[in-house]
Amino acid sequence: MTRFTATRALTTLARRVRRAPAAALGALALCAALAPAGAAETFPARPIRLIVPFAPGGSVDIAARLITEAWGRQLGQPVVADNRAGASGNIGMDQAAKARPDGYTLAINNVALAVNPSLFARLPFDTERDLMSVGTMGTSQHVLVVTNSLPAKDVKQLIALAKSEPGKLSFGSAGTGSTLHMAAELFKSESGANILHVPYKGGGPAMLDTIAGQVQISFPVLSAAQQQVQAGKLRALAVTGPKRSPLMPGVPTVAEAGLPNYTFETWFIVSAPAGTPKDVIATLNRTLNQALSTPEMKARLLKEGFEPLTMSPAQADAMLHKETLRWAAQIKQAGITPE
C-alpha cells in the first residue's frame, strides 16, 4: 500500500465515524454514565483491614487474631489485623471512623468503646454517629486475684479487710478506663470497700506487681492469669462473670462469693465506618457469625478463655448503647474525672 492509498483510507474511515448516527452514540454515552463504577466488583474483592486499637498481646489483640483466619475463610479474602494503639484505643477507632465506608476497613474493640465517651472530655469521633456495628465476637471473664501475702482467703474476707483499713489496700489496672479498672470500680461500688487504684501501662505490669505484692489486688482477664494461678503465684478468689469458668471450675463467681448483683465480662465488638452499605454490613455479619459457629473456632476460643457471642448489627448497636449508658453512670458514681 502506497502512502497516498493509506492516507485516503484513513480519511474515509474518519468520515464514516463522523457520520455515525447521533442516537447510537448517545445511547453508548448513556450506558457508560449509568454503569456503576464498581459494577464488576462483588464484595469483598480484596483483603479487609481490621484495626486493633491496642498494643499486641492484650485481650483485644488476642481476640482479633483468633478470628481473622476463620473469618477470612468465610469471606474468601484475608482479614488482616493492624495494631494502631494509643489513647486508650481512641487513635485506632478514630482511624476506623474516618475510613472510607466500603467495608474494607473495620475495627475491633471491647468495653473501652462504651467507657471512653464518659472517660474523655473530648473525643475526635462520636461513637454512635461515626461508627456502626458489624457484630460481636465473644466475651471474656476476668478473675479477682490477690497477692499470696494477703491474709484474705475469700471475697468476704477481702471486703472485711478493706473496710477495716480504708484506702490501705490497692488494686492494679491496665490504666484508667481499662477493663481491669472498670471491673475493680464495679467491685468497689457493690462492696462499699475503699481500695486505692494504681494504674499501669498494661495488664502485664499490673499482674507482675500483684505477684510481687506492690499492689494487693488485680482483675486480669482470666486467660492471662490462669498460668500464674496454677503456678501458685497468685490466689484466685472469684471470677467476674455470671457463671463459673471451665478454665477455673473450682473458683466461684463474685456473685456466689458474696456480691449477688456483681457481674462483669469483657465483650468484643466489630465496627465499621458509618455509611457502610447495608448489604456489605450484612455480608460481614453473616460471615463473622459463621466463623464463630464452627466447632473448631468454639474450641479455640474456650481454650483462650473466650466464649463466642454472635449478634446482628442491630443487636450489637443496642448493646453498645446500653453499655455506654451503664458505664457513664458508673464513672460518675466513682468520681472518675474525664481526661
Image (cartoon, rainbow, N blue to C red):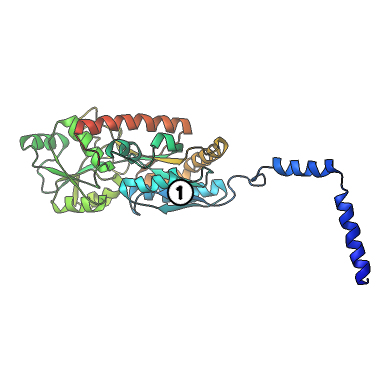
Q: Residue furthest left?
A: 164
**Circle count:** 1
Q: Residues within 10 Å of mark 1 (few under 14, many from 20)?
A: many
Give the quadrant of residue 90.
top left
Q: Residue at x 13, y 44 (%)?
A: 170
For this rendering, which residue is in front, 33 or 189? 33
For this rendering, which residue is in front, 46 or 238? 46
The answer to whether 88 appears left or right of 46 in the picture is: left
Specify whether residue 4 is in view.
Answer: yes
Q: Residue furthest top?
A: 261
The answer to whether 253 appears left or right of 322 in the picture is: left
Q: Report the quarter where the N terminus lies.
A: bottom right
| Place of residue 9 in the rendered image (x, y in percent of width and height, measured from the top left) | 91, 62
| Place of residue 175 in the rendered image (x, y in percent of width and height, measured from the top left) | 24, 46
Q: Secondary structure at mark 1?
A: strand
| Place of residue 54 in the rendered image (x, y in percent of width and height, measured from the top left) | 35, 50
Task: Please state which amino acid type lies under the numbered disc 1.
Answer: Leu
265 to 82, vertically: above or below: above
Give the quadrant of residue 315.
top left
The answer to whether 38 appears left or right of 10 in the picture is: left
Q: Report the quarter where the C terminus lies.
A: top left
| Place of residue 29 in the rendered image (x, y in percent of width and height, measured from the top left) | 75, 44
Identify the residue position indicated by label 1 in the image. Answer: 50
169 to 55, vertically: above or below: above
Give the quadrant of residue 277.
top right
Specify whether residue 140 is in view.
Answer: no
For this rendering, which residue is in front, 4 or 24? 4
